[in-house]
Amino acid sequence: MTRAKAKATILVPDGVGGMVKVPDRRFEPGDWPIQFQISAKQADTWLRYFHAEYERRGWSSSSIGQFEARDNSGSITVNTGGANKPSLAVVWERRRDRPIHVRARSAGTPEFPLAAAQDLFEEVNQRCRSGAMEQVYRRGQLEYHGLPWCGELWLDDTLRLAPPSRQDETALFGPRIILVDYLLACVGRGEAGYVFDQALQELSVFISVVMGSAVRVPRQGRAWTWIFADGAVDCAVRNLGYCEQDNPQEMPARGASRSMPLRQVNRPDFSRGWLVGSINEESLPADITDLWEAYRSLTTDQLRQFLQAGAKWQEALTQRERSTLSFALMVVACEALKPADPQFRDHNIYDVVEALLGKANAERLREHWFRPQDVRHAHLHRGEFRGSEFAPAVIMSSYYDPTFDEARRALEPITREAIVEWLRRRGTFTMAPKLHL
C-alpha cells in the first residue's frame, strides 16, 4: 500500500476547552514494543472490539485512516483522561481478506505503562476470538399505510412488535406506527445505535415481505403541513414523525398488550389478507414466527440475497405512483432469488417462479397479455412506460385498456409468495439448466 499523509488538518476537543490536532502516527519513527496480527476471520470485527474495550474503561480516542480498494490503514490515539494522563498510540494495516497487523506504544508523557497496554490488547483479542457479545435494549419505530396495528407480536425472546399508544382515528386506512422493542447483540454499548439502525432497516424488509405492505423506517426531517381550523387554513413547517409518550428503559414483559391477530394461510397464499377476519385492524399470517426463524437461520450469503430481493419488493410497493417502475422492480425482486451459479445467469422470472411456485404460475406469466420480462426490459433499458404515467386522465375517456393494471395487481402476490417460498426453503431450490443450442 502506498501510504499518504492527510492533506487536511483535523482538530478535536482536547477535554480542557481547547482543540488539538489528530496525529497520523503511521509515519512516526522509533520502536513499537507491541506488535501482533489478528487472523482474517476475526479482522473484520477487531476494531469494534478494540473500540468497545477502551470505551468500557471510560477512555476516548481520536483517529485518522486511509482507505483504498485493496488496502486500508489507520492511526488511533487512545486518551485515558485529560492532558496530564497517559495516551496510547495504535497503528493498524490490512489488505483485503487478509489479517490485520497492529502495533502500539505509549504516546507522550506521562508514559502509558507497557503492562497496562498488554493487558488491554489481551482482553480485546480474547473477546474478539470468542465473539463475545452483550445485550442492549433499544426501542424504535416502523411505519406503513393501512389498517391499525393494535396488538403485540413476539418474533422471538429478543424482538417485540407492539402498537403505539395513539392511532389515527379519522380513517380506517391511514398512516400507522409499529413500536419495535429489541434486545440487540452488540460488541459494546457504544455501537448499539448503529446496530439498531441496521436491524430496523432489515426488519422493515422482512415485515414488508410477510405483510405485503410497504413497511419502512420513519422518514426524518421537517415539511410544510396544514390543518383546517376555525374556518381557516393553518399552514406551518413542522417536524415529521410520531412521538411515543411511553419509552421504557428495558424490555417490556410479555402480555403488556393484547396479542396480534393471526390468520391461517396455505402457501402459496394469494388471498387478500386484510379481508380475512376483522377488517378493523391489521392481522398477520400465522406462520410469521416460522418465517422469522427461517430468516434468522440464513447464512451470511443467503441473508444478503434475501435482503436484495426483499428490498426491491419494498421499493416496488413504495413506487406505485410510477406503476411501470413498480412492476419492473417486482420482476427484479424475483430474479434476485436466482442461485448465484453462473449456469443460472440467463434464467429469469419465469424460471424462478416455476421452480418456487409451480409451472401453472409461470405459464400464466408467459401469456401474451402479461409477460413481465418484456415490461422489465422495455422500462429499465429504454425507459418505456406501460402504465398511465404522464398520460392524460382517463376518467372522461371513452376507451380505457385495463390490461397493464390487471397484470400489476396479479404480479404483486406472485412476487411476494416467491420470496416467501424462497425463505421457507432457506434459499435451497432447483432450477432446470437452460439448453444452449
Image (cartoon, grey):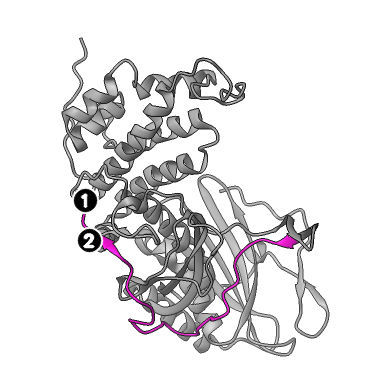
For mark 1, what is the residue? 424
For mark 2, what is the residue? 290
Q: Is residue 126 left or right of residue 268?
A: right
* Whether residue 363 is situated above or below residue 53 in the rendered picture: above
Name the secondary structure under disc 2: helix
Distance Cα–Cα, label 1 vs label 2 = 8 Å
Residue 183: percent from the left, percent from the top?
Answer: 40, 76
* Whether residue 367 is situated above or below residue 220 in the rendered picture: above
Task: Please check the rendered image and state whether residue 30 is part of the magenta-colored stretch, yes or no.
Answer: no
Q: Which residues are magenta?
A: 238-264
Q: Specify whether residue 167 is in view.
A: yes
> Observer-nearest residue: 175 or 107?
175
Residue 289: percent from the left, percent from the top?
Answer: 26, 63
**Residue lying farthest to the top in this orientation:** 437
Residues at circles 1 and 2 in contact by the CB criterion of under 8 Å? yes
Q: Residues within 10 Å of mark 1 (few under 14, many from 20)?
A: some
- At label 2, the amino acid type is Asp
Residue pictured at 43% horizontal, 20% vertical = 377
Mark 1 vs 2, N-terminal side: 2
Q: Quadrant of the C terminus?
A: top left
Residue pictured at 38% horizontal, 31% vertical = 331
Q: Specify whether residue 33 is in view.
A: no
Residue 113: percent from the left, percent from the top?
Answer: 57, 89
- At label 1, the amino acid type is Arg
